[in-house]
Amino acid sequence: MEFRKVTVNQENTEPASKPKRLGFNGLTATEWASLSTNVWSDLSSPRQARHKEHGAVFPLKLADRLVKMYSAPGDIVFDPFNGIGTTILASKRLGRNGVGIELNPRFVEMTNEWLTEIDSELITSSGSALVHHDDCRNMSKYLEPGSVALTVTSPPYANFIQRSIADREKTHKKSRIVLENKSVVKQYSEHESDFGNLDYDLFLDESRDLFATLFEVTKPDGYAVWVVKDYRLPPDRPYISMHSDLAKAAQDAGWLWHDLIVWDQNAQRRLVLLGFPTRFYTNQNCSFLVVLRKKK
Ligand SMILES: C[S@@+](CC[C@H](N)C(=O)[O-])C[C@H]1O[C@@H](n2cnc3c(N)ncnc32)[C@H](O)[C@@H]1O
């Protein structure tokens, strides 16, 4: 592995005659270094009606950045929990070939509508995007072994969404969470194959199996980035480290835990008074990007 000191935001200092060295992802050393911060606070972007209808979409900026960091033009970029298609849309715009799988037919439809809209903006793009309506456990039907360069995904957080809904009904009906964070929590579907309908322990078991299948379809030195939040189920489980539990499940399936990036969402969320006056809890206003790599 090569660690070189690079001065960011400087013009190319190499002699004009020498061609710039590029990384595996097509980035120059300066671009590479500027993307290498491990806390991201600049991802806020306007929410469109489609984002509100789905309820748990990550920003296009996040997908763009990960696609640039961990894949090269022409690569296959995969999202097993496609949602409305943010990953595959970013991939197409950046000249990659996006493949998504989504269980809920309405979200498949919304993905195709969004893709049609951006097609009119793309004058030239060598990229593509395709979403399959299926259970992501069947990913091997659509992807050759060793073909995926990068996975960018955010799974449902087990059945925590349903618990949050019940909790909000009971305690937060008119609270700041709903009124000021403008956050909407929804169950994705009632389908028995939906990862959002699984108890946490079963969710981890099923995720371990999914990591094993994902490992098979990923190429050597390929990456997988899982975007997740940690959780609380007070009083018995005050802190559930979903990001490290998932990283452990991935390691059990053969992946290397390659890196961790913190997505700071404090600017988008007001603080909520938690546990006052008896127990002090912090607001969990960040998500974690668990970066996995398939060893060569
Ligand atoms: C957190 S959302 C992903 C949103 C996505 N990152 C985006 O930006 O649109 C998780 C998605 O996984 C889907 N899902 C749940 N279980 C699934 C399964 N077994 N196979 C495929 N998709 C599934 C849900 O319907 C939901 O749309």
Image (cartoon, helix red, strand yellow):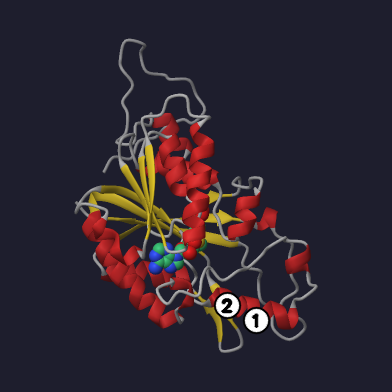
**Quadrant of image for the N terminus:** top left
Number of marks present in the image shown: 2
Q: Does the beta carbon of the residue at mark 1 sit less than 8 Å from ligand 1?
A: no
CA separation in Å, label 1 and label 2: 6 Å
Q: Position of residue 263 (x, y in %)?
A: 55, 55
Q: Does the beta carbon of the residue at mark 2 sit less than 8 Å from ligand 1?
A: no
Mark 1 and mark 2 residues within 8 Å of each other at the beta carbon: yes
Residue located at (65% from left, 48% from top): 48
Residue 255, can we see it?
no
Side of 178 where 16 appears, left or right: left
Residue type at mark 1? Ala
Q: Position of residue 191 (x, y in %)?
A: 45, 74
Q: Position of residue 205 (x, y in %)?
A: 34, 77
The part of the image, by quadrant, that contains residue 212 is: bottom left
Side of 185 where 99 appears, left or right: left
Residue located at (33% from left, 40% from top): 3
Residue located at (24% from left, 58% from top): 141
Residue 96, can we see it?
yes
Q: Is residue 241 above or below residue 134?
A: below
Q: Position of residue 59 (x, y in %)?
A: 56, 49
Direction bottom: furthest residue = 236
Side of 23 where 144 appears, left or right: left
The part of the image, by quadrant, that contains residue 260 is: bottom left
Q: Circle 1 is placed at which residue position?
A: 166
Direction top: furthest residue = 17
Side of 153 where 233 appears, left or right: right
Q: Circle 2 is placed at which residue position?
A: 162
Residue type at mark 2? Gln
- Label 2 sits on a secondary structure element that is helix
Q: Nearer the viewer, residue 295 or 59?
A: 59
Q: Nearer the viewer, residue 128 or 205?
A: 128
Q: Is residue 295 above or below residue 162?
A: above
